[in-house]
Every structure is written in C-alpha cells, then in structure tokens.
Image (spheres, helix red, strand yellow):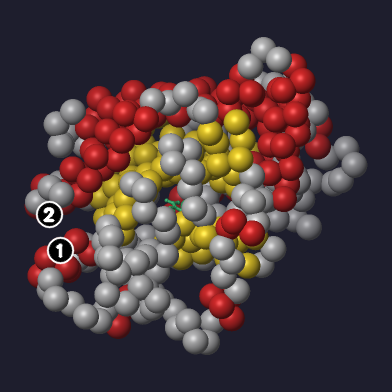
Amino acid sequence: MTSIKSLLAESPYLTSIPASYIFRNNNIDPNDSALLTEPELKIPIIDFSLLTSGDPNQRSKVISELGEACENWGFFMVINHSVPERLIDAVIDGCKGFFDLAEEEKLEFKGKHVLDPIRYGTSFNASVDKVFYWRDFLKVFVHPQFHFPNKPSGFSELALEFCKKIRQVVKGILGGISEGLGLERDYIYKSLNLESGLQVFAANLYPPCPQPELAMGMPPHSDHGVLTLLIQNGICGLQIQHNGKWVNVNAIPNSFLVNTCDQLEIFSNGKYKSVVHRAVVNNNATRISLAIANGPSLDTVVSPASELVENRPPAYIGLKYKEYLELQQSRNLNGKCMLDCVRLL
Ligand SMILES: O=C(O)CCC(=O)C(=O)O
Ligand SMILES: [Fe+2]
C-alpha cells in the first residue's frame, strides 16, 4: 500500500484524489454541515500548574473544572504543563525528519501485527480499510519497554525524554480526575496499573490534499486507552464531536489537547464518556500531529470501579486491555463500535 507521501511524490500535480480515498460527500452528509467553530463554545482549559500547586482552594477548583470537562466534553486543553516548548518543537521536528526519510528506509519499520512495537504505515489498517485515509503514520510502543526507530539521528533520545514527561503530566491529570470522582488521588493510576502501562507514540502526517472536502485524515473514532495527549505543528485539523456536532479545535499554542478514552469510560462506569473525534485535511499545508496514548498495562482487566457501581449497576463487562486493543486495531475504525462489544446496558 503506497504512502500518501509517495503518492504525491509520484504525481506532484495531482488535482483530484484517487477514488479509493473518497470518504465523504459534503453535500449529502448532514453531520458535516453541522460544523461549529470553537470560539462560540469554549472548549475547557485546564491549568495544570494549579493541579500541582500547594493551594488547596485552587486545586479543588481545578479538580471540579476537570470533572466537568470529562463529563460534558471528554476533551480539554492543558496549559502550564511545564513540558518545555523547545522539547515539544524538537519532537515534532523529529517526526517530520522521520517522514522525510526515503520510503525504503521507512519501510524497514513496517510492522505486521497490531502489537508489533514499531509500525510505519498509511491509512489506519490498510488491509481492512474500505476507504483509505489521507494519512501516513508511525506508531511506537514506548512504555513499559522503550522501542524506537534508530533514525533520524537523535530522534529516539528526544522521544524518550518527552514521553517520560508526558507520563508525569498524565499522572497529575489522573490524580485530579480520581479526586473529582471522590476517590483517592492515585486510585485510577494504581487500579489500571499505569506504572507499567502501555504508552504509544503515534505520529501522523497529513500532506496537503487536492480535494480535502472529499478525503478524511482519520475517520470518527474514540481512542482505546485512558487519556490521549496530542500536540501538532501549528496546523489545525482535529475535530471533536460535541452534542452531536463537529467542533473545530483551535489549539492554544503550546497546550496539550487531551481526550478521555474508552478505558476511562469503562472504569468510570460510563460517567466519563470517551469522545469521538476525527482529523480533517486541508489543501495548502502539511499537518503533523503527535498523539501520545496512555493506557493500562496490557494484562489489566478493565471493568467499572467497584466504588462507582454502588448506585448504578456495572454498564460494561471487564476485558483485558490487550484483547480490547487487538480487536480495535484489527477492525475498521468506526466511531465507538468497540465499546458496544463490552457494553451491558
Ligand atoms: O491528528 C489528529 O488530530 C487526531 C489523531 C488521532 O485521533 C489519533 O492518532 O488517535
Ligand atoms: Fe484518536
């Protein structure tokens, strides 16, 4: 399966996309006409420094903001996270450097199975996708064991430092979410074994597309883990579903875009729904996004927390995270269809 990058290198003056990439027709999709832009809506913003500050009033205020964001949006932007901007920029440059390698060099990292620790590819799962997505990707398992491509030089070291810092931010946010649910600060972190949790570094390349209104970078889906943190190269393209409408996310510079994922929905017994999101493409700039997915350890059986099923019976069956992940990755990416496999109510 040809990457988008090679497709464009072979046909630099492409004016229409191959039929196999036509995902939608704006004229007939009512969902697409329901697009809202974000300023009217105020996507929640969480000040991470207040979560870690010693001031209990500020902390309890931000914990309740976090709870509202999880309940009403499943999405928020995190500012003042203390991960240096130069590190973020360098990691994004590293992703660009990887995608700029010759195709033969990248193909050395072409994985076969969803649990292969390094996988370079295109679309989502090109062997089952009915329509191809306008996206090339590099997915790497960086925790509990750190794997990484050995090129471009220096990229691996930067990624190691970055992912470690992200785990600290995730720990802080999950502490706030736990307390917001009335649990001990480290309850979610411990119950889901985040200390040995799976962390996936997923870099996405969306080259300019001659017919962006017909193509899709990534189709509507929810993420399988607990929390995903996303950064990008200053070019927007992420949209989240909110009250049945698509909302453009205009990221605050240097913020992390955070979405709550399926394992948190299951663990919170449906109180915090994982958010459906997608990536649209444009016709003038290459977009790079980097999603860091943070999940339980692969052998954790995730089920609704016992503390949260007192007033409401469990709404999901327990399933080992590894099994959930294998199922999700081997199918078509389609909204929240995976959660339906474990839903009881
Ligand atoms: O590129 C984006 O904005 C979204 C990426 C995404 O949803 C993912 O990698 O799971
Ligand atoms: Fe996603």
Q: Is mark 1 within 8 Å of ligand 1?
A: no
Residue at the location (60% across, 31% down)? 47
Q: Is residue 129 visible?
A: no
Please, what is the three-letter code of the amino acid marked with disc 2?
Glu
Farthest bottom residue in view: 28
**Within 10 angstroms of label 1, few (less than 14), some, or many (20 or more) residues?**
few
Q: Is residue 234 left or right of residue 194?
A: left
Residues at discs 1 and 2 in contact (Cβ within 8 Å): yes
**Within 10 angstroms of label 2, few (less than 14), some, or many (20 or more) residues?**
few
Q: Quadrant of the N terminus?
A: bottom left
Label 1, on which residue? 6
Front residue of 2 and 64: 64
Q: Quadrant of the C terminus?
A: bottom right
Q: State the SS at label 2.
A: helix
- Which of the 4 image quarters holds residue 242? bottom right
Q: Is residue 52 left or right of residue 149?
A: right
- Which of the 4 image quarters holds residue 52? top right
Earlier in the chain: of badge 1 and badge 2, it is 1
Task: Give the number of the disc on residue 103.
Answer: 2
Front residue of 14 and 186: 14
Please, what is the three-letter code of the amino acid marked with disc 1?
Ser
Q: Position of residue 109 (x, y in %)?
A: 20, 45
Q: State the SS at label 1.
A: helix
Q: Position of residue 196 (x, y in %)?
A: 49, 25
On screen, residue 201 above or below 251: above
Q: Is residue 59 left or right of residue 250?
A: right
